[in-house]
Image (spheres, rainbow, N blue to C red):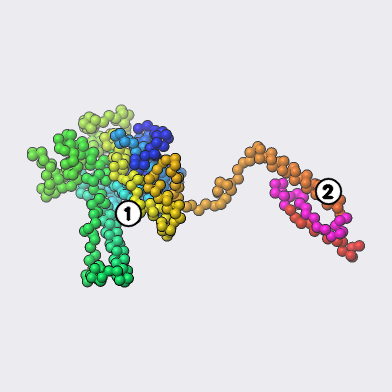
Amino acid sequence: MGHTSLDKIKALQKNPANVRNLCILAHVDHGKTTLADSLVASNGIISSRLAGKLRYLDSREDEQIRGITMKSSAISLHYAAGKEDFLINLIDSPGHVDFSSEVSTAVRLCDGAIVIVDAVEGVCPQTQAVLRQAWLENIRPVLVINKIDRLIMELKLTSQEAYTHLQKILEQVNAVTGSLFTSKVLEDRAVKEERAEEDKEEGDIEPAECPGSEQVYDWSAGLEDSDDSQLYFSPDQGNVVFASAIDGWGFSIQQFAQIHSQRMGIRAEVLLKTLWGDFYLNAKAKKIMKGAHAKGKKPLFVQLVLDNIWSLYDAVVTRRDKEKIEKMMMSLGVKVMTRDLRHSDPKVLLSAICSQWLPVSQAVLFMVCDKLPSPLDMTSERIERLMSVGARRFHSLPLQTQELKTAFMQCSSDDTAPVIVFVSKMFMVDAKALPQNKQRPLTQEEMAQRRELARQRHTEKLAAIQQTESGEGNAQSGSTTLATTPGGDNTIGKQVVVLLLPRPSWLQ
Ligand SMILES: Nc1nc2c(ncn2[C@@H]2O[C@H](COP(=O)(O)OP(=O)(O)OP(=O)(O)O)[C@@H](O)[C@H]2O)c(=O)[nH]1
Ligand SMILES: [Mg+2]
């Protein structure tokens, strides 16, 4: 895709339903900026060859030198999904705990987040922290399990082992979400009970009706009634992408469901439900069956997805088997440039093939547009929270400010709509660094004016001195005169009081 013009971006901004405001969150070094590079390259802002190497959003010199992100940076991207055009406002945040304030600011500005987890390291302390932050700010996350190439090249796992490993990572992430959900339900329940207790004290409710009067405290009460099915990450829900940002590939199981439904003649919806899980393909009956683990069969995900990727890495990077590579490229419908085919580094050829076969940007941007909410979906509760500063409650704000909530909810870009500026972060800045206090070079006109003023002041000074000399006689009569100091500053005339006193009698 070529560069998107500014006019196009402006037009896209007018359709809030197709705007996605999101940030990339993860533990340090899990690959946020590398993934952002691929997304930026999809808009032609950087070359796809440099994606992953450039770290475009690490725009500060110190970030490039140290190889870590220190400040959040934002970029607007265009994504065309079929006939629909989307505007994606993306923020890349730092993962290091020292810069966590940058993360909270980014999260506050967004409606959704891409949470990245390194496939080897799994869930780390900052992964938990960012999941919690996203939860508290009420923004929806999607998951990218990144660096899957490390499972092949570094850990040398088989596709079957990698599948078990990926399942564990998913369980870890969902365990964090599960604990956040449980504490929220229990918190809500505690608030409810507190209110009921207050009502009881006021005599509104009969003691028998009050839940606080139960003999046995049931901590799990309330959990069964709350629906948490939409909260968890699951490949069949379309909110998980498996990727290797450095090699430029990524996929969701929808893509493989589409590919294999045509090849195998099985409905895509059936494949979508069975590609991830304990299912296997019974080749004789041409049926998908349950119980792969118990029967010692290859799960569908291994057979139809991972095996393909593993054999590509084997042919291109490990064996460098030209014949096999050509066959694979033919069957995948991929064409690469001769210089990539002949490159001494096999990773160059691998990226060239993978970025055409399973471009990570397409998988991630599709998931983001499909699964993350638009600004129009922002809840009234979240808007009120954003509009209230510190401990101040929304209802205590001036009425005019409260009225802005409607405009906030509509996200209208009409000429009549008010312009709302949201200050998400305050910086301490030295007063001298403010633009109005900075010294700037004078224009020719200003210099001429100043020269003229100085000349006038000089003439006045001379006149004053002459006057003083001629009026010395008056001094004896004890009068006071105001005079400007000779040799004073040209621009700002300092005034001093010269006190002319009567001559003392012993001098006469
Ligand atoms: N093997 C492998 N390495 C990767 C992958 N993605 C990123 N890396 C490497 O991981 C390191 C960190 O990548 P970054 O993109 O800077 O990570 P980050 O999450 O932005 O780091 P901070 O912003 O500092 O928290 C770099 O050396 C990348 O080359 C991947 O898919 N596979
Ligand atoms: Mg980074």
Q: Secondary structure at mark 1?
A: helix
- The x, y position of residue 319, in whole percent, is 23, 36
Q: Is 475 in the magenta?
A: yes
Q: Residue at x 37, y 35 (%)?
A: 43
Asked if one can make out residue 414 in the rendered structure from this viewpoint, the answer is yes
Q: Is disc 2 placed on a helix, strand or loop?
A: helix
> Is 413 one of the magenta-colored residues?
no
- Camera-side residue of 200 and 331: 200
Residue ID at (30%, 71%): 203
**Farthest right residue in view:** 508
Q: Residues within 10 Å of mark 2 (few under 14, many from 20)?
A: few
Q: Over which residues does the magenta segment extend? A: 473-494
Quarter of image, res 348 = top left
Q: Three-letter amino acid code at disc 1?
A: Trp
Q: Residue at x 35, y 43 (%)?
A: 20
Residue identifier under label 2:
466
Query: Which residue was labeled with disc 1?
Result: 135
Furthest-top residue in view?
Answer: 338
Between the residue at mark 1 and the residue at mark 2, the CA separation in whole angstroms equals 80 Å
The quarter of the picture where residue 226 lies is bottom left
Q: Earlier in the sequence, mark 1 or mark 2?
A: 1
Quadrant location of the N terminus in the rendered image? top left
